[in-house]
Amino acid sequence: MRAGWLHGYRGFFREILNTGTLAALRLQVRTGVLHVLRSLGRSGPPDPVALFLANYSADGVRLPDAQERPLSLAASRCLACGLCSLECARVAGSPPLDPREAVLAGSRLGIDLARLGLEGDLAGGCGACRACEALCPVAIPVARLQARLAGPGSGSGTL
Amino acid sequence: MGPRSSERAGRALLGVRGVVIGGGLAGGAAALELARRGLSPVLLEAAPGATALTAGTLDVAGAVPGSRRLRWRAPLRDAPLTGADRIAILIGTFASHPYAALLGRDAVRDDVATPVKLVEAAVAELDRALVPHGLGVEGQLDENRLLADQHGVMRVADFVFTGAAAGSLGEVPEIAWVRIAGLAADPPAVALRRLAAERATLGLPPVPTRTVELRLPDGLPVGSPARLAAALDGPDAPAELARAAEAARGGARAGCVWLFPPVLGLANLKTNLEALRERLGGPTAETLAAVPDPTPGFRLHRALGAALDRAGVERHRGRATGFETREGRVSAVGFVGDGGAHGRLEADAVVLATGRFLAGGLCERDGLVCEPILGLPLFDARGERIDGRPARAALRRRYLDAHPLFSAGVAIDARLRPVSFPGTAAVLTNLFAAGDRLTGFDPARDRTGLGVALVTGVLAARQVAALASAP
């Protein structure tokens, strides 16, 4: 059991040997040493959710919202074909976010919008004419995603 | 002629109601053909499929299967093959290729004229239907047009839509690669290096190239290909493009081919290309497109829709869910429309052109591949069953392998009617299938994608018409 535990840290040495860079070393120390020390100092089994948030909330990850799950799943069907963007441009829609980008962002609902590199003011949303939806091969509710991205919470850059 | 035509009109009035299911080229071609024959068709469309994602070509027989590597390059290295030769090779290679079922296994070798005439007539009709809506089809079955896509990768095509049509790069004095300032694209040097390497593979002599940067007037949305294409539909676009081209022209050889990114307008493409050609003095064309900027497919989708409206085709939006049958015939098609409302279309004959996986013509249900309307068995190009298995089981490990899943479709009899197993009787006597719904071909590999859709769509419509004129 103990050997198996060590087994996971083979990469630590290999990475340093292979790259020899300081950045790699720092990252390896963080994951390989600090992480281990922290887990040793903890008493009892940790709360997985709290642990998850402690580790990743700084990177913009939020807990998935059960209500957003269907929307997020629908967005993850996206083929990135771009027909929605063309149709939106043709009907002269002026959404703050290009429809295809809105869908790609929507498939990552649960991530801090600020981390997605979205620019401009999202408030207001698109005109909800739904022209794009008629052209989507996989029937993604693009207008609803646009509304969600423009909705409450988006101003502060979080979902 | 008199009595016959009035007789025909009488039958049309009596109404053989042909319902076409599928909003792509196969369904569109079938509906247009029925409308041309005076049988008012009904079209049920769910979602755009592969047609709306075409790179800009209509490939009828663009490749020569059999050579393991660089399959489409073979016709250039060896003696150029005629279109009939290529169809014959396709039929000889894939026993269940739709062309074989349609044209007869021996028809091509014995009588070359028939399939060629059939294909050319179908393309000419499509061209006639699309031209009023700003899109045409150019080319010949015997032609090997060498086209480059926006990354500089080349391919052979026989028929090409307006846009890339004039961009053939076979024997040309010079190639000018146009970059629009501000528009994201491969660095021209990278694309041109790729182009040169591709030409060398084909055994073509090196050709001088030049990179040209086009500065469009301020205010045009050059940041997004989609917005730019829509903006170039404006009334000032031809003049603005010509002015920008004038500034970029300097010292090109006569006959230089000018290649633009595929953003030169949606409906006004032809006008823009002509304005540029006038100013530049050589052939002007767009490169072929690559997803995620499917401008050519979008144009085709739009033009096809406009042509269907113009032909008076009754169109419904919805997804077919099942058939009502009576005495071995379809009598009605059930569908679910927008918002979940159920609908029903009376039918005397049905053309099933719902495509493969993209728009949901075939799907994975409960983890198993299936044909959702009738639950028909599906076969791959080698004739092996692939329904009732996970999609993953019909994929090979390597990306470029021939994946059985990509040639999945239903088997048909000689009259395009789906059958349960090859050689058995038709499932329903008035149900015909067309396009990607058929088995036996892999459009991405044998380059017969939209060609099969067009030809089988037209032929399925003829079968419906034959029912109408049967005693």
Image: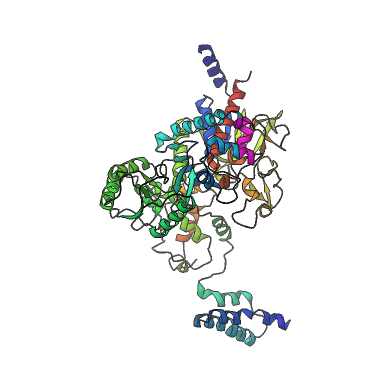
Q: Is residue A155 magenta?
A: no
Q: Position of residue B242 (x, y in %)?
A: 28, 46
Q: Is residue B107 magenta?
A: yes
Q: Position of residue B73 (x, y in %)?
A: 52, 47
Q: Position of residue A56 (x, y in %)?
A: 55, 74
Q: Quadrant of the C terminus of chain B?
A: top right
Stretch in magenta: B90-109
User: What main secondary structure does the magenta stretch of the protein show?
Assistant: helix
- The part of the image, by quadrant, that contains residue B17 is top right
Coloration mode: rainbow
Q: Nearer the viewer, residue A147 or B94?
A: B94
Q: Residue at x 43, y 53 (%)?
A: B150
Q: In the figure, B351 relative to B465: above or below?
A: below
Q: Position of residue B210 (x, y in %)?
A: 34, 54
Q: Nearer the viewer, residue B350 or A146?
A: B350
Q: Residue at x 54, y 49 (%)?
A: A139
Q: Nearer the viewer, residue A20 or B22?
A: A20
- Residue B347 visible: no
Q: In the figure, A41 relative to B277: above or below?
A: below
- Residue A118 visible: yes
